[in-house]
Amino acid sequence: MGEDLTAVVERVRGSVEDVIEGKPEVVRLSLTVLLAEGHLLIEDVPGVGKTMLAKALARSIDCSVRRIQFTPDLLPSDITGVSIWDQQRRDFEFKPGAIFAQVVIGDEINRASPKTQSALLESMEERQVTIDGQTYELPSPFMVVATQNPVEMEGTYPLPEAQRDRFMARVSIGYPSADAELQMLDVHGGASPLDDLQPVAHAHDILKLIEAVRGVHVAEPIRRYAVDLVAATRTHPDLRLGASPRATLHLLRAAKASAALSGRDYALPDDVQALAVAVLAHRLLPTAQAQLNRRTAEQVVQEILQRTPVPAEPRQGVGTGRGTSAYGQQPPRRL
């Protein structure tokens, strides 16, 4: 990325970290998903700042923002919109729902019924909504930031596999450290810092960043490494459902965004490793025996990372002029 785009990333990162204290890795993952054109699932116990993180990210960017509070009585049409008969025009008029925004915050997404949850499937994958046979394009950039409580909480409906698979990454904020919580009392004690949060980037800046991420080079060994990691989840004895090909694509896109955030125009195996748990774990279903043994999907992904050979860096050519890593060498173009 150029210096101007790097400055935009740092402004957004600093703006969000002013609200979410002591969690820089969570903020970085949120930005990674944004630049990789993905959707983010924030899962944790109530009161740790899930909605605060989603709002801080949305307000730091000068984009249209809509918030949906998912409840058991929420209808699919509340999300996608509905066609209403206009008496004067004697025709149906489409009233857009809350999904028609550039950043959509879905609060407590697993408190709505599966029927309502499914209203997000088309918009998250195809970035469009089809109502009464008519297709409506969603704005760009488009990102869904959803929060959910753990499934053992009261009044929750587990997200179906197809829904979880559309989220690029899942993150848990966790409890803050004692120092961060003490600082939170000083900052949040009088008023919410969201009240003073102003946009530090425009939508066209984010589109430029997304375009820069698309141009990040991924060498063949790293692409094969990502495929090997995902393939290992499909044959692991502790899993009854492995990761999908969509997961492989999401892992690659996230690795490219991570490389761009680190100031590189090429991806490294470290980028894939750092994101494997966040991108893959929420898509996996452990077997009943693994659950009895208290084996989590995160532990399985960590085990796969340890067992899967890391690709050795290819020998660097002479006079490439592309930094210090041979992974940055672009393959020769065929004429």
Image: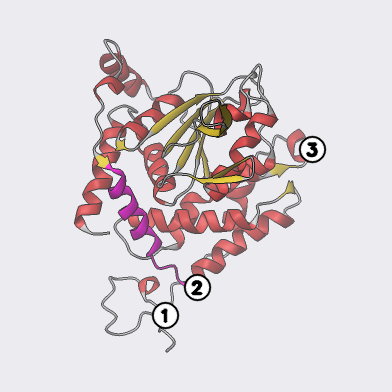
Task: Please state if 35 lies on the left or on the right of 242 as rendered.
Answer: left
Task: Tell me where the magenta segment starts and ends, as one range.
Answer: 202-219
Residue at the far right in the pictured view: 289
Q: Residues within 10 Å of mark 1 (few under 14, many from 20)?
A: few
Could you tell me the amino acid type at mark 2? Glu
* Mark sitting earlier along the chain (1/2): 2
What residue is shown with label 1?
331
Percent x, y of residue 58: 36, 34
Measure how far apart labels 3 and 1 are at the Cα level: 46 Å
* Residue at 56% from the left image edge and 50% from the top image edge: 126
What residue is shown with label 2?
220
Cβ atoms under marks 2 and 3 closer than 8 Å: no
Cβ atoms under marks 1 and 2 closer than 8 Å: yes
Tag count: 3
Along the viewing direction, whichever of 123 and 295 lies nearer the viewer: 123
Element type where label 1 sits in the image: loop
* 205 falls in the magenta region: yes
What residue is shown with label 3?
288
Foreground mark, 2 or 3? 2
Task: Please state if 165 lies on the left or on the right of 333 as rendered.
Answer: right
Percent x, y of residue 300: 64, 47
Could you tell me the amino acid type at mark 1? Pro
